[in-house]
Image (cartoon, rainbow, N blue to C red):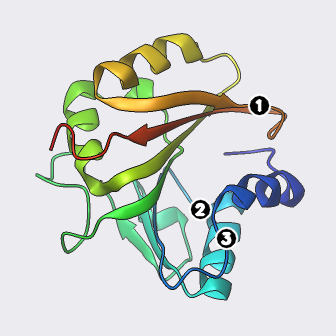
Amino acid sequence: MKNLNKQEIKELLTIIPRDYPSMDIFHLTNNCDELTYELDDFCTSQGYLYELMILDTDNCQNEKANKFDFEKNRYNRMSRLYDFVFVTIKLEDISDIDSFYAKLYPISKNAGKVLFIVENDKDLRELEEKLIEKNYVAVNPIIDTFSNYQILSAQKMHGWGN
């Protein structure tokens, strides 16, 4: 993700509660960028777990980066469930998108939030309908945060579809 500034990222991160005893955050991305570093710093400052999953770890110097594999049976590590899931990969590059959504859904805690950060030219309505079809609720755009990207937030329905 290019053209993100720290202020935009800090504004987005205000949706994550502060000073909770424990929060687990999963981030699926193509490479390390400003968002990965800001999320890492934020999680470190709060004592939260940050699982950084990257398609190409060769382009990342973060020691927390883990190689992501679409073919895995489950996307989470050590059966962990996450409070927040950030997805910043290009969805159109995924060969089996239905399998992707099916594996992404169960890694969130009940009522966990998933945030898709996509290009400005992406049709959010199409993504919104797909997420609703996959049992997500409260699917809404987060507006006026990033100037070069759109954000679509969705929540895992309590106990559905597992």
Q: Amino acid at mark 2?
A: Cys
Assign a secondary structure to mark 3: helix
Q: Earlier in the sequence, mark 2 or mark 1?
A: 2
Quarter of the view holding residue 20: bottom right
Sort mark 3 into few (<14), some (14-19) or many (20+) by Cα contacts within 10 Å: few
Q: Quadrant of the N terminus?
A: top right
Between 146 and 19, the residue placed more toward the observer is 19
Q: Residue at x 23, y 26 (%)?
A: 98
Measured in 3D between alpha carbons, the distance from the residue under mark 3 to the one under mark 1, in whole angstroms, is 22 Å
What label does residue 72 carry, if any? none
Q: Amino acid at mark 3?
A: Tyr
Q: Earlier in the sequence, mark 2 or mark 3?
A: 2
Q: Quadrant of the C terminus?
A: top left
Q: Residue furthest left?
A: 73
Relative to 156, say whether 48 is above or below: below
Comparing labels 2 and 3, the label whose residue is closer to the camera: 3
What label does residue 32 carry, if any? 2
Please say if the residues under marks 2 and 3 sit with CB atoms less than 8 Å apart: yes
Residue 86: percent from left, percent from top: 51, 51
Q: Is residue 83 left or right of residue 47?
A: left
Q: Earlier in the sequence, mark 3 or mark 1?
A: 3
Sort mark 2 into few (<14), some (14-19) or many (20+) by Cα contacts within 10 Å: many
What label does residue 143 carry, if any? 1
Residue 136: percent from left, percent from top: 37, 32
Q: Is residue 21 left or right of residue 5?
A: left
Residue 48: percent from left, percent from top: 52, 80
Q: How many marks?
A: 3
Q: Residue at x 79, y 48 (%)?
A: 4
* Residue for badge 3: 37
